[in-house]
């Protein structure tokens, strides 16, 4: 376990930089408007990560709303609508290595205190839905098991089926690695305060 944490920490920056480039590439792909709809290929991304945190759900919960502390790929968060930490709150997210108009929005669509936070992710400026993130917390004996699911659909113009499959696998693996690193960072932050 200690060795795997060292490996994760060692590769942390390299994976975050890679994922930032992947995110920028994906965002650029999403703004391309193809002229022929028959050339559009769909790719569904479904990623699940899980982690156990030695703290009650009430200690983990506030961090889900302060993602900039543990998601180091985020350069800026700005509230654009809604009340803080409530259904309807909408934030503009600017990833590191991008400018504001290359970012995206997140909107809280389900908030069940200490149990579940569901976030809708959509593009700037066209409001096209990219996907959803679902944080589900399960507490037992003062410890929290966090399940972090990401669901997204990508439209990929002018790609062959094989290219879509290869691209999809790369995005899946990169996303899963990034989320696992972020989960470990969240765990460290929460446990250090508990």
Image (cartoon, rainbow, N blue to C red):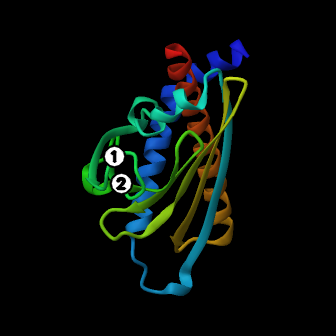
Q: Which mark is residue 1?
A: none
How crowded pointer 2 is (Cα within 10 Å; few <14, some 14-19, many 20+) is rated as: some
Q: Position of residue 1 (x, y in %)?
A: 73, 16
Q: Quadrant of the C terminus?
A: top right
Q: Residue at x 60, y 72 (%)?
A: 42
Report whether 115 appears left or right of 95.
Answer: right
Q: Secondary structure at mark 2?
A: loop
Q: Position of residue 157 (x, y in %)?
A: 51, 73
For the residue pair 11 and 144, the one nearer the viewer reads as 144
Disc 1 or 2, which lies upstream in sequence? Answer: 1
Note whether 179 is above or below 141 in the view shown: below
Q: Position of residue 190 (x, y in %)?
A: 52, 22
For the residue pair 191 and 126, the one nearer the viewer reads as 191
Note whether 4 is above or below 78 in the view shown: above
* Residue 38 position by quadrant: bottom right
Report whether 20 appears left or right of 173.
Answer: left
For the residue pair 43 and 193, the one nearer the viewer reads as 193
Per the model, the C-alpha gap separating discs 1 and 2 is: 6 Å
Whether pointer 1 and pointer 2 mark residues with C-beta atoms closer than 8 Å, the reply is yes
Label 2 sits on residue: 89
Q: Residue at x 43, y 79 (%)?
A: 34
* Residue 90 position by quadrant: bottom left
Q: Residue at x 46, y 67 (%)?
A: 129
Note whether 101 is above or below 42 in the view shown: above
Label 1 sits on residue: 84
Q: Secondary structure at mark 1?
A: loop
């Amino acid at each position: 376990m200690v060795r795997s944490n060292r490996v994760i920490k060692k590769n942390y920056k390299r994976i975050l930089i890679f994922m930032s480039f992947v995110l920028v590439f994906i965002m650029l792909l999403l703004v391309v408007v193809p002229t022929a709809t028959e050339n559009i290929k769909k790719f569904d991304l479904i990623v699940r990560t899980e982690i156990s945190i030695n703290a009650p759900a009430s200690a983990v919960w506030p961090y889900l709303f302060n993602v900039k502390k543990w998601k180091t790929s985020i350069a800026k968060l700005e509230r654009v609508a809604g009340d803080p930490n409530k259904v309807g709150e909408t934030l503009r997210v600017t990833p590191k290595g991008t400018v504001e108009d290359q970012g995206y929005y997140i909107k809280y669509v389900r908030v069940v205190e200490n149990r579940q936070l569901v976030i809708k992710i959509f593009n700037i400026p066209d409001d096209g839905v990219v996907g959803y993130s679902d944080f589900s917390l399960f507490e037992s004996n003062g410890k929290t098991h966090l399940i972090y699911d990401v669901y997204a659909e990508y439209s990929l113009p002018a790609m062959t089926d094989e290219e879509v499959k290869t691209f999809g696998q790369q995005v899946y693996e990169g996303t899963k690695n990034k989320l696992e690193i972020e989960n470990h960072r969240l765990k460290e932050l929460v446990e250090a305060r508990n």
